Image: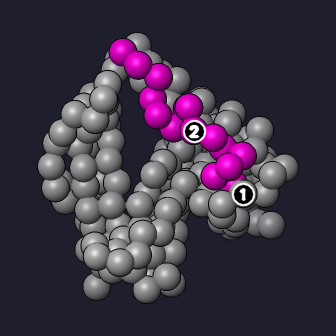
């Protein structure tokens, strides 16, 4: 595997998926007042379900995506995480482009995601990749901004 390749995660990757996710989201705990949802995900179940894709050897970045069919079919970008040591190296950009390609390969014309309203860095990033705000709403302890991206 080249360091730029993005591949489906395996069970052997689960510890790295947890490590990268925790490293990427840990600093938000104090800011938002709760543990970010990606840190509490069942990483092993997500890997088993084929939802997790990783990059790097060792793993430095990942996405968790889920396909939804029927009315409003879309690809949900459930989580994207880049280890802080790899910030600024283009890993996040490559992962976002991968999500676009994955949606297209599945025949889906829309990607959806949400981010915590207090994760303001994300609100500057996503519009630059074609995402538009759909709504802001509170889901339990999370104040979330919901986005969508329509693919050509």
In the picture shown, does residue 92 fall above or below 25? below
Of labels 2 and 1, earlier in sequence is 2
* Within-10-Å neighbours for mark 1: few <14, some 14–19, many 20+: few
At which x and y percent is residue 111?
35, 67
Task: State left or right for residue 140 relative to residue 45.
Answer: left
Q: How is the image coloured?
A: one colour
Q: Residue at x 68, y 49 (%)?
A: 45
Name the residue nearer the viewer: 77 or 7: 77
In the picture shown, does residue 65 fall above or below 79? below
Secondary element type, mark 1: helix
Query: Between marks 2 and 1, how big is the CA–CA gap?
Result: 13 Å
Looking at the rendered structure, which numbered label has been put on residue 71? none
Secondary element type, mark 2: loop
Q: Residue at x 15, y 49 (%)?
A: 135
| Label 1 sits on residue | 48
Q: Residue at x 45, y 29 (%)?
A: 36
Name the residue nearer the viewer: 130 or 141: 141
In the current view of this chain or complex, which residue is farthest to the front?
Answer: 70
| Label 2 sits on residue | 41
At which x and y percent is residue 131?
25, 61
Q: Is residue 43 magenta?
A: yes
Task: State left or right for residue 64 relative to residue 5.
Answer: left
Q: Which residues are magenta?
A: 33-47
| Residue 125 visible in rendering | no
């Amino acid at each position: 595997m080249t360091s730029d390749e993005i591949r489906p995660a395996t069970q052997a990757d689960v510890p790295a998926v947890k490590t990268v996710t925790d490293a990427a989201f840990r600093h938000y705990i104090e800011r938002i007042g709760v543990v970010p949802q990606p840190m509490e995900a069942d990483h092993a179940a997500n890997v088993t379900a084929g939802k997790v894709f990783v990059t790097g050897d060792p793993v430095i970045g990942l996405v968790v995506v889920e396909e939804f069919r029927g009315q409003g079919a879309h690809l949900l970008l459930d989580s994207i995480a880049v280890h802080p040591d790899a910030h600024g190296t283009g890993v996040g950009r490559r992962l976002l482009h991968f999500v676009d390609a994955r949606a297209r390969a599945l025949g889906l014309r829309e990607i959806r995601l949400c981010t915590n309203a207090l994760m303001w860095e994300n609100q500057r990033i996503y519009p630059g990749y074609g995402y538009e705000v759909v709504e802001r709403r509170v889901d339990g302890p999370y104040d979330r901004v919901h986005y969508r991206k329509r693919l050509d």
